[in-house]
Amino acid sequence: MAPGGRERPVPGAGRRLLLRLRNNAGACLGAGMLAVALATAALHPWLMPYDPIAVDLDATFQAPGAAHPFGTDSLGRDVLSRVMAGAPISLRVAGMAVAVGLGLGGPLGLFAGLRGGLADEAVMRLADIVLAFPSFLLAMAITAAMGVGLEKAIFAVGFCFWPRYARLVRGQVLVIREEPYVEAARAMGAGTLRISLRHVLPNCLAPVLVQATMDSGFAILATAGLSFLGLGASPPTPEWGAMIAEYRQYLVSQWWMPVFPGLALSWLTAGFVFLGDGLRDILDPRLRAGGGL
């Protein structure tokens, strides 16, 4: 009850979510780290002090200083500029890989959960077969079969994600399809497509959002790993994994060359992990039971 005897207005669902997000330290930390990465990706053409691929043989192996805060590499390229230029590449990797996994697995999980029977069994057994292989090794095999390239590496990593989205969406559908409002819509003559779009999919968004956020960090690491092995981005593309692979031989003598791309990679990955873990705490009703907003 508000002062003066007036009832305090009940916040809407969106406001309650923002309040829970604000009160979750991990989610706030992850959101802040991702905000820095997003700002860098959006503003890097104006923030970069040098051309990230311009060669200057008179400025090779310069240690971090006023002119080059992150130092220069073996070709005289500014490491800070290359790290900044790699931010939009890594964010694109995260978005495209998750889009591939969700685009393949989401419809399959929805189909399996709604149809049941033989269709459900076939989709789940196919998912089990893919999950039987270690994700990174499977991504390596797919990339090697398709050919070297950043886009092919992104697709390979995204393909490894589809079974988890199929299983996640299927599990949600099996619960939601028994809810009274779904039964009522079916009794009123609503078709499968209408029920899926109006009632089932909106209620699957919360767990899918959490999974997508967590997978974004893994996608960045996996694609960087493929680039490190020579299966992803190729020089002079300023992708962080490719930069670490290119600079690894200088780890002892010119430490700044591999360390700063590695720190940037860790920063972005940790941001996704913190945000995903916070969103799970906020959106999972089992974790919120009995406390808070």
Image (cartoon, rainbow, N blue to C red):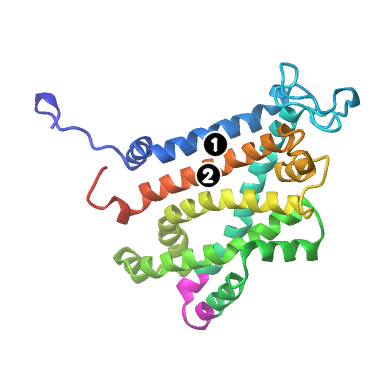
The local secondary structure at tag 1 comes to helix
Image mark for residue 34: 1
* Residue 77 % position (x, y): 82, 29
Q: Is residue 52 left or right of residue 182?
A: right
267 horizontally vs 70: left or right:
left
Q: Is residue 238 above or below residue 189?
A: above
Disc with the residue nearer the chain's start (2 vs 1)? 1
Depth check: give the residue in front, 254 or 40: 254
Labels 2 and 1 touching (C-beta < 8 A) = yes
Structural crowding at the residue carrying mark 2, measured as other residues with C-alpha within 10 Å and reported as few (<14), some (14–19) or many (≥20): many
> Quick check: is 230 in the magenta stretch?
no
The residue under the point 60% across, 53% down is 98
**Magenta stretch?**
111-121
Determine whether, in the image, residue 2 is placed left or right of residue 172: left
Mark drawn on residue 291: none
The extreme front residue here reads 252
Q: Main secondary structure of the magenta part?
A: helix
Q: Quadrant of residue 123?
A: bottom right
Tell me where residue 76 appears, x and y as whole percent.
84, 28
For this orientation, the residue located farthest to the right is 57
